[in-house]
């Protein structure tokens, strides 16, 4: 999936305009299953989920899920770079029914830099954003993928643990 199609939106509230968002013609359950696989392929672990179903004010049934995710290697690198970044970790990914479509959203990792004001997080933010965008963009039948603006980052080579992860090393603990 070409992640260059992602862009900021400002449709519902102040948070949404800073999210990676996709709308897909599938159920919340199918999107959840595909998204979990795609997040895993990008190195993210799903720690927990919050699920809600019910009736909205118009009497229509709704389904809403939040996946609590994190990338162990990127989280460790971010915390080592800026201990205050823990305020915005882990990353929540929302999956919700929106009429005949399902909307999938993840908060833009750039919030790490905005919260801490530490430019040393740039390369980590770009890496995390790319991984989230690829995972969300991997949903089959994705009909609308919205891209966030680019972030400039220092050119830093990946650390040894990142290279091991790229080669398939299964040890991804945050220790």
Image (cartoon, rainbow, N blue to C red):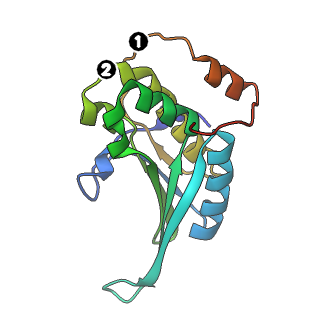
Q: Residue at 61% x, 61% y: name it.
A: 31
Q: In the image, 35: left or right of 4? A: right
10, above or below 86, in the image: below
Question: Which disc, if any, is residue 119?
Answer: 2
Q: Does 52 appear above or below 7? A: below
Secondary structure of the residue carrying numbered label 1: loop
Looking at the rendered image, the quarter that the N terminus falls into is top right
Q: Residues within 10 Å of mark 2 (few under 14, many from 20)?
A: some
Q: Mark 1 points at which residue?
A: 154
Would you say the residues marked 2 and 1 are in contact, meaning their CB atoms lie under 8 Å apart? Answer: yes
Q: Earlier in the sequence, mark 2 or mark 1?
A: 2
Horizontally, residue 105 falls left or right of residue 47, namely left
Report the residue at 39% width, 17% height from top.
153
Q: Position of residue 96 (x, y in %)?
A: 47, 66
Residue 82, percent from left and from top: 35, 28
Distance (Cα) linking label 2 and label 1: 9 Å
Residue 14 in view: yes
């Amino acid at each position: 999936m070409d992640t260059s199609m992602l862009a900021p939106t400002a449709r519902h509230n102040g948070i949404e305009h800073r999210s990676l968002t996709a709308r897909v013609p599938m159920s919340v359950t199918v999107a959840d299953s595909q998204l979990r696989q795609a997040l895993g392929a990008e190195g993210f672990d799903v720690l927990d989920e919050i699920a809600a179903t019910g009736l909205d004010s118009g009497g229509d049934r709704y389904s809403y899920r939040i996946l609590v995710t994190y990338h162990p290697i990127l989280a460790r690198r971010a915390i080592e770079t800026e201990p205050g970044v823990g305020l915005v970790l882990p990353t929540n990914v929302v999956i919700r029914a929106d009429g005949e479509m399902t909307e999938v959203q993840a908060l833009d990792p750039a919030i790490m830099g905005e919260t801490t004001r530490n430019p040393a997080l740039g390369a980590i933010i770009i890496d995390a954003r790319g991984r989230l965008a690829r995972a969300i963009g991997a949903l089959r039948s994705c009909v609308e993928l919205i891209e966030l603006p680019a972030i400039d980052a220092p050119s830093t080579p990946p650390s040894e643990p990142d290279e091991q992860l790229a080669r398939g090393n299964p040890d991804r603990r945050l220790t």
